[in-house]
Amino acid sequence: MIQTLPPPYAEPYPVLGLGTWRMGEAASRRAEEVAALRLGLDLGLTLIDTAEMYADGEAETIVGEAIAGRRDEVVLVSKVLPENATRRGTVAACERSLRRLKTDRLDLYLLHWRGSPPLAETLAGFEELLSAGKIRRWGVSNFDIDDMRELAALDEMKACATNQVLYNLGRRGIEFDLAPWCAEHNIPIMAYSPVEQGRLVRHSGLRQLAADKGVTPAQLALAFVLDRPGTIAIPKTATATHLHDNIAAAALRLDDDDRARLAALFPPPRRSVPLEML
């Protein structure tokens, strides 16, 4: 059973989900990607994150195929591109995503990153979608602390359901100010690339620590992200082996010694740093 976010977070979202970045980019992998998402659902990974940007909508099409007949099992997340994020553009983009996903609603709809349209316009689009029942909640992605403060001035943090950002052992910058600010406002962090697209597994120190614990480096890196309260991880996984490994990581518990050794290998920030993006 995958743990869910506890109160005071507004929604009990699963803390481990399925990312789809880079899915849909090769027709030869389509069947494998659909099968991986279906297996993820079978294993209890019910949160699926996608976006209109991913493979120009093809990732959403794959997700739609994977969840056919199982929509009510899924916490479905998608994103609007900033160039589409005017009030009317947000509504139109969402409707296109819904058609590709073959569903009548999203559980969570995010602004993918800041663009030129004013935030107030995007929020108006979100509110229109909420009123129409086309989304259940909305949130943001790749927002740094100044962006969140600007959002708070408009929304008073009454509705924002998450901030999806790059976060992993090698990208700990959010720990200085952004993550504490979000925690203070009961906004969960949704961490993309929690294993740095596999690059972290080559780190010699991480490999040794993982070996000492009898786990894989990827499992330890993912467990680090999940160890932070109020954090959801959405690794992209397209194989059965990796799905089972991720579920095992969700059950892995770190102790103070583990955290200290990881901090020695990957030091936390000592000052505010700009938000990183991939």
Image: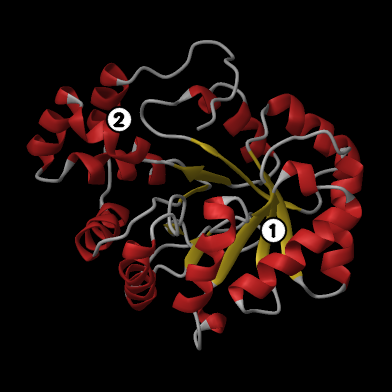
Toward the viewer: 100 or 251?
A: 100
Quadrant assignment for the N terminus = bottom left
User: In this orientation, does residue 38 appear?
Assistant: yes
| Up-down relation of residue 89 to residue 103 (above or below) | above
Going from N to C along the chain, the mark reached first, 1 or 2, is: 1
What kind of element bears circle 2?
A: helix
Query: Where residue 158 sits: x, y (%)?
Result: 81, 51
Q: Does any portion of residue 13 appear in the rendered image?
A: no
Q: Residues within 10 Å of mark 2 (few under 14, many from 20)?
A: few
Mark 1 nearby-residue class (10 Å; few <14, some 14–19, many ≥20)? many
Q: Is residue 186 left or right of residue 58?
A: right
Residue at the far front in the pictured view: 27
Reply above or below: 10 against 148. below
Q: Give x and y (percent) for residue 111.
A: 71, 47
Residue 23, how many percent across, how many down?
Answer: 43, 57
Q: Is residue 142 above or below residue 96?
A: above
Q: Secondary structure at mark 1?
A: strand
Is the residue under label 2 in contact with that under label 1 (CB below 8 Å)? no
Q: Amino acid at mark 2?
A: Arg
Name the residue beneath numbered marker 2. 259
| Residue that appears at 50% across and 88% down | 69
Q: Which mark is residue 109?
A: 1
